[in-house]
Amino acid sequence: MEGELLTTATQIWPDTKGHFGPYGGRYVPETLVAPLEELERAYEEARRDPNFQRELDSLLKNFAGRPTPLQFASRLTEHLGGPRIYIKREDLLHTGAHKINNCLGQGLLAVRMGKRRVIAETGAGQHGVATATVAARLGLACVVYMGTEDMERQRLNVFRMRLLGAEVVGVNSGSRTLKDAINEAMRDWVTNVRTTHYLLGSVLGAHPYPAMVRDFQRVIGVEARAQILEAEGHLPDLLVACVGGGSNAIGLFHAFLDDPNVKLLGVEAGGRGTTLGEHAARLAAAAGYSGARPGVLQGTYSYVLQTPDGQIAATHSVSAGLDYPAIGPEHAWLADRHRAEYTAVSDDAAVAAARTLARMEGIIPALESAHALAELIVRAPKMPRDSVVILNLSGRGDKDMEILARYL
């Protein structure tokens, strides 16, 4: 069954209604159906337009800084005594994370649709910074919604967004984190659909967002595949990436989905413990994390952390970018079909991993990316020395200095 799925992956993910198996779809108020259909049509036309792709490629190269290096981590490899470890350096992109890949694509779409205002949600602030940056580059008005809890954790990014000309709106409802910021952004969009494009930051939300964001992030895996073949002469044995909504992970994984010998590992936020409310792990049930089951949240059907009576559960993570109660529908489908494995690591392990990478390779990772590294640190010594791993370093750690300073 798995082989059959892999050979037809590009045909069925997603189907014409935006479903990845049972997951995905479009669960929105009637007022948003028309703008989502408009966006779907515009994206399908843009995908087929060579001029759109040329403009996007030019911006990715000359503005964002692609291609990013695939660095052999020689000292980390020696330190762990396991496989040869390569790091995909998305942290070297303009604005400091992979988020700008998607923002440039959607920014060009907004211009194409005649929308002169973009809105966005952000947790760690990296998507907000990337959106504000692209809006400034393309001459668009920009509003970013951010939970006040995240604004406190990520004050540097709040200042960066405002310096770039964006209006940052604090959201003080609910848990005051990413989920609540998305709620406010969707309310804004309902009110201003004629003039505004909602530049959603991950592989979440209603169709076509999960597939569209994935496609704009596929450049990570396409580059990594070519780079590892040049460096090693063969494909890697394992890909590792952190998973919040899941855009950096699916961006790396997608170019390897039809290669069954390449294992895919997504690492979620294990937070302070395995009980509901102490973590943000949706697919890591095998590791003992509780509370996730399929449900609808913010436009899509996927695994969602819920209380026994169906209320959206509180979450926790030291990293604001992983602190979300649902996961992208394509990841849910990959987990169900056992094409990808998902686990979680604790706050403490992620912070320790960030320090290890800083001292071994001279790279300070974002705390989100440090979760992926923490799991690799555990697994690498048990792997054959002739195996090859690619770790996606989705962002740099400048934004997390205050958190790391308090923690350490």
Image (spheres, rainbow, N blue to C red):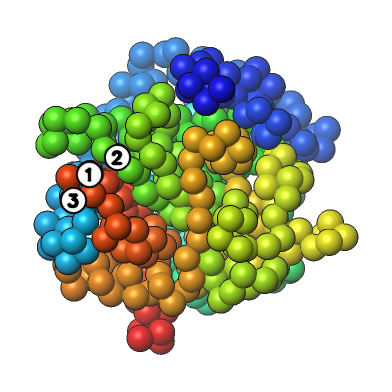
Which of pointers 1 and 2 lies earlier in the amino acid sequence? Answer: 2
Residue denoted by label 2: 237
Q: Is residue 382 left or right of residue 134?
A: left
Given the image, on which type of amino acid does mark 2 rest? Answer: Asp
* Labels 2, 3: front one: 3
CA neighbours of label 3 inside 10 A, class few (<14), some (14 to 19), many (20+):
few
Residue denoted by label 1: 387
- Where residue 224 sits: x, y (%)? 26, 36
Q: Is residue 105 visible?
A: no
Q: Residue at x 52, y 30 (%)?
A: 212
Q: Residue at x 77, y 36 (%)?
A: 27
Residue denoted by label 3: 385
For residue 184, which quarter of the picture? bottom right
| Mark 3 residue element | loop
267 vs 405, nearest the viewer: 267
- Marks 1 & 2, CB-CB < 8 Å contact: yes
